[in-house]
Amino acid sequence: MSKPKAENSSPSTNEGLLDVIIIGGGPAGLSAALILGRCLRRVLVCDSGQPRNAASHALHGYLTRDGTSPAEFLKIGREQLAPYETIAFRHARVQDVERAEGHFAAVLEDGERVSSRMLLLATGLVDELPQIENFRQFYGVSAHNCPFCDGWEHRGQPIAVVGCSKDAAELALELRLWSKDIILCTNGGAVCDREALDLLERNGVDVIKTAIARLEGKGSELERIVFQDGSENARRALFFSPGQHQRSHLAEMLGCEFCEDDGCVQCGEDASTCVPGVFVAGNASRGLQLVIAAAAEGMQAGFKINSALLEADAERGAVKSGAGDEKHPAPIPN
Ligand SMILES: Cc1cc2nc3c(=O)[nH]c(=O)nc-3n(C[C@H](O)[C@H](O)[C@H](O)COP(=O)(O)OP(=O)(O)OC[C@H]3O[C@@H](n4cnc5c(N)ncnc54)[C@H](O)[C@@H]3O)c2cc1C
């Protein structure tokens, strides 16, 4: 195995066309880089350092990494990619992408342009947090959005779900698996779904409609919810079902299509989008929003991108080993 490279090294434009630029170095992007790099594809991963789970202290539900901090998880991922001379990593935001004749050009925040035959978008999502005073103080430690990620740590505790959408009502019902003491706080809103309300009542979930004034607790450990009428309710954890939007505008810029219901980038089973040569993986696309699922999607996308590159080269009789200096990239398919 060769020596690890410096983390910020990258193939520059004068080294020619890269095989793949991966935009986003979260679990999806790093996984894709691993499989592509191992296929001797020249890969550049660009990452702006804003992973979706940055507020969390411990990642759960990933076999072998349960309880690891998200930052440590990414550090291990980058360290394991470092020995591959086919993979370069840049801490940089890609601010612009263009489709050119037979390739893509990405413009990094420092103005550098890099080009590749194919693009993988692994740019993730942003969660829209409830507008409650001092919510961020508790976010990631005792205020969460995913019971599969953080329900176990609050099992048996008094839990509040905040929201008045059907999703919030379903989340409250689901959380009964973790605790028998669940309330739904609509924060001044009304749960419009009658059926959902009936289900909550039948399953012992109380609904509190009073608007929330603030959250209180020690450090990031929630102790109580204070309502605008002055009443209080002792709670150890709060869950919510967030609205979400794409972290990056690049998919839109490239002309990708989006799912109407959840705003995810539309793609086929093979991670390909409607734009030839552009693939998507992880939370930016459909599927389970878990780290292990994002990593698996990245791996699948990498596999498919390698096949697409191989197919394009085979058509031209140009399949060559990436070992040594041989490199004869074909244009991306139109
Ligand atoms: C508070 C919280 C806790 C969570 N806890 C868990 C848990 O315990 N277990 C679990 O399985 N899941 C958990 N999740 C879900 C998990 O965070 C996601 O499933 C996972 O991060 C998705 O990986 P990804 O690679 O698709 O996206 P991300 O991890 O969000 O990575 C996307 C990367 O792309 C980068 N990027 C975006 N745009 C650009 C651009 N233009 N140029 C360069 N880089 C760009 C971002 O900076 C980011 O680093 C949690 C989520 C939240 C919000």
Image (tube, helix red, strand yellow):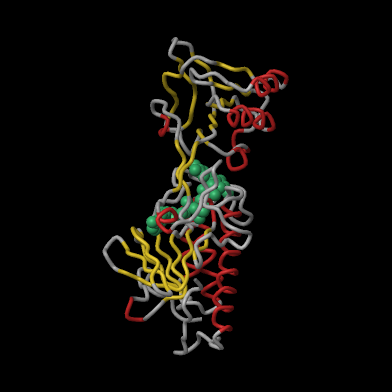
Residue 198's place in the image compared with 326, above or below, is: above
Task: Judge from the rendering whether residue 50 lies leftward or rightward of residue 296; answer left or right.
Answer: left
Would you place residue 145 above or below residue 181 in this image?
below
Residue 18 image position (x, y, % from top left): 42, 76
Q: Can you name the residue that lies furthest to the right here?
A: 202
In this orientation, which residue lies closer to the viewer: 243 or 216?
Answer: 243
* Residue that lies at the very extreme toward the front in this rendered image: 334
Instruction: Work out whether residue 215 can be spotted.
Output: yes
Residue sitting at x 55%, y 86%: 319
Q: Nearer the viewer, residue 160 or 76?
A: 160
In the rendered picture of this protein, how many numbered marks are placed on residues?
0
Q: Position of residue 273 (x, y in %)?
A: 53, 60
Residue 192 position within the rendered picture, expressed as x and y whole percent measured from the top left: 59, 21
Residue 59 visible (yes or no): no
* Drawn side of residue 257 relative to residue 249, left or right: right
Corner quadrant of residue 175: top right
Q: Is residue 287 above or below residue 188?
A: below
Q: Nearer the viewer, residue 282 or 182?
A: 282
- Residue 120 x, y percent position in the rendering: 49, 63
Residue drawn at x 59%, y 43% is 149
